[in-house]
Amino acid sequence: MLSVSNPVMRLTRVGDDAKPQGRRILITVAIHGNEQCGLVAVNQLLSSGELSVSTACRGEVSEVVFVLGNPRAVEADVRFCNENLNRIFMEGADVVEVDSKIYERTLTPGIADEIDKASWYMDIHSTSASSPSFCIPASSGTSSKVAECLPVEFVLEELINSLQGTTLHWAMRDKTKVAMVVECGQHKDPASVTTAKRVILQFLSLASKKKVGDPTLQEKSNK
């Protein structure tokens, strides 16, 4: 299970089923420690068997990596400990800034490295107030196409321009990467966990397809 003591989980095709040149998928959860719907969703999917190497790593996918972004903040159930982790990934930087005195800045190198190695990336969040689910895709056309196929209520393509220093900004340094943020609803609303589960499964299904232009990609799952 994904947890504070086990913040990184990898599902990888091995042996005769290995696909070294396949897509590497990264899903981050709890970048903000009080936004735990993604963490709960991943663990529920693992427990139910809906998420496994055989179900997640198929088609074009070689590996799926889940990262719990801010373990100490999750443990304390707070947004962050010292500094907002989702405001310190600067898009134009060559490397992330590390400061051993600031907890969140000790996390950025590992998260940035995982993002850099991924070909598809999704960051799962929730909101403090009641909110519909929505997706913020990277500025690439492919990311927008994928976002339109996710089971969320809105896709907000321009919202990324009003933010700074997010994990999505770091991902956007690579214009070929499929990347997006999904806000699943209010923090403690059970419906946000349901949305997160459906978004994760759909994202992995879309990533498994050979081409983003595959006609089946256009079939948006039911809300």
Image (tube, rainbow, N blue to C red):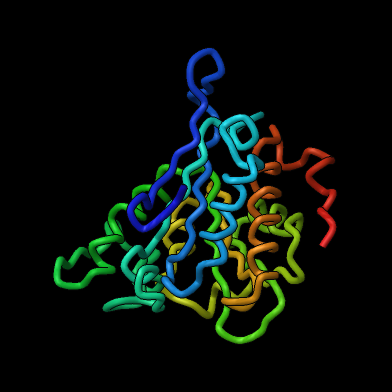
Name the foreground residue: 101 vs 74.
74
Corner quadrant of residue 92: bottom left
Corner quadrant of residue 87: bottom left
Q: Quadrant of the C terminus?
A: bottom right
| Residue 10, above or below 113 | above
Percent x, y for residue 51? 61, 41
Percent x, y for residue 77? 41, 75
| Residue 94, above or below 24 | below
The residue depicted at 83 percent of the width and 41 percent of the height is: 216
The residue depicted at 70 percent of the width and 43 percent of the height is: 206
Q: Is residue 106 left or right of residue 21?
A: left
The residue depicted at 82 percent of the width and 54 percent of the height is: 220
The residue depicted at 61 percent of the width and 62 percent of the height is: 137
Percent x, y for residue 8? 39, 48
Q: Is residue 186 left or right of residue 171?
A: right
Corner quadrant of residue 222: bottom right
Name the foreground residue: 162 vs 185.
185
Name the foreground residue: 158 vs 207.
207
| Residue 127, above or below 212 | below
